[in-house]
Each structure stands twice: as structure tokens, then as C-alpha cells.
Image (cartoon, rainbow, N blue to C red):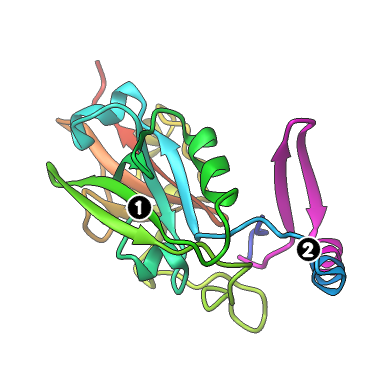
Amino acid sequence: MFDADGRAVGIVVRDANGVRVYAIDRALERVRALIAERRAIPSATGLSLQKIEPALEAFFGASGVIASDVVPGSPAAAAGLSPGDVLRQIAGYDVADADAALRQLTGSPQGQPVALTIGRRGKLRQVIVVPDSLPAAPWIDAAGNRTGPATARAARDVFVPDLLGRTHIPADAAIVTIGGRRPERVGHVTRPLLVYVDDHGTRYFAVVAPRP
């Protein structure tokens, strides 16, 4: 979790008991304790996944799961994964659910290669990801701020109120790209636009559609 200034302030944990939020200081203390006790820590890949909703199918050409974020310097980045890649298989098993796929990845032994089949621009390819322990964080600077494209702009500065009001994108979220390009002011749309959003550290794809 990141605050309005982009500083890391907490970690969200989802498990069988529901969703819990830990302050960043408490989370780091717990991690250090686990390391000291030599207890198992879930593997990390630096990969975030998002379900392909019907509105996104026209852009990605498939239903299923896409990479919504790939952390710089992470195992997923080292494997060549990019946001927008469609995740088809993990270790030969079909992928249909983002949460199940993440559980499978985090449950993979650290240091053991995992084969992923992905779709990119209509072609299938296989990549190998080697899950690690919690990686170094080159995407977080010394002040706890997430680094990102200097060209990103606030949604309120990109979309006119009428357009923004027809989406679920917060006004203060950052628009990273529109149609794969740097964001420019949008006054109206005549066709659906694929938008890549950074909502205080959580990245995802969304669609801005013309008025019906």
C-alpha cells in the first residue's frame, strides 16, 4: 500500500481468513523475525495478475488472466514478462483464476524454475521464472516512494469529468499509458481506449469507453 505521496505505508495480506492490512514497520519486523527463525517465507516473483474482464477481451484477444504489474528487478522482470502479457499456463496447467495462479506461484519452492506459457501480441511463448525470497526493492527509493514513469499524469488531468465519471478510475490515480503511449489530455472518445493505471502503487488495466 502507498499513500498519496507514493510512500510505502503497509502490506495487504489475503488468506483463507480474509484480507488483513499490516503497517509497513510491523510487516518488516515480522519478515525479519521469520528470517531469524529460518522459517519458510512465501516465494516472490514480482508479478501481479488481473482477470480479463469482458471489456478488456477486445484488447487482449482472450479471456483469462493478464500480468497487471511486473516489479522492476524482480524474477518476473528477469524472465522478460511485461504488463499486458496473457498468462496461459503455469508448469503445464491451464490458468483461469488470478488468485489461484498467484497462490501457485508463491507456493513454488524458491530457486526452482517454473515454466510459464504466455500470450503476447497473439503469439504464445514460454518463459522461465525462478521464484526468490522477498527481493530487493529497486522500485522503492530511499524515502519509501515508488519510482515510475515521469510521464504519468493524474486521471483528473487526463480525462474530462464526464469521461472520468463513467469509469472506476480514482481522480488522483496516475495514468501511465493510454493505448501504450504517454497520456495526453482526452476530451472525448469515439472508440474504447485501453488505459494503464497506477492507483497509489496498485497497477491495473481499464477501459474508457465512448458514451453509448
The reply to whether residue 209 is visible in this rendering is no
Looking at the rendering, the stretch of residues picked out in magenta corresponds to 6-30
Residue at 68 percent of width and 59 percent of height: 3
Residue at 82 percent of width and 72 percent of height: 32
Q: Residue 195's image quarter? A: top left
Up the image or down, 70 lies above or below 16; here it is below
Q: Nearer the viewer, residue 61 or 153?
A: 61
The 10 Å Cα crowd at callout 2, few under 14, some 14 to 19, many 20 or more, is: some
Q: Residue 211's image quarter? A: top left
Q: CA distance from mark 1 to mark 2?
A: 32 Å
Amino acid carrying label 2: it is Ile
- Total number of numbered labels? 2
Secondary-structure class at tag 2: helix
| Residue 7 sits inside the magenta stretch | yes
**Residue with the mark numbered 1:** 115
- Expressed as whole percent of the image width and height from the top left, the position of residue 17 reads 79, 31
Please report contact status of discs 1 and 2: CB closer than 8 Å, yes or no: no
The answer to whether 30 appears left or right of 156 in the picture is right
Up the image or down, 115 lies above or below 99; here it is below
- Expressed as whole percent of the image width and height from the top left, the position of residue 30 reads 85, 63
Q: Nearer the viewer, residue 185 or 22?
A: 22
The answer to whether 21 appears left or right of 212 in the picture is right
The reply to whether residue 15 is visible in this rendering is yes
Secondary-structure class at tag 1: strand
Residue 7's label in the rendered image is none
Residue 24's label in the rendered image is 2
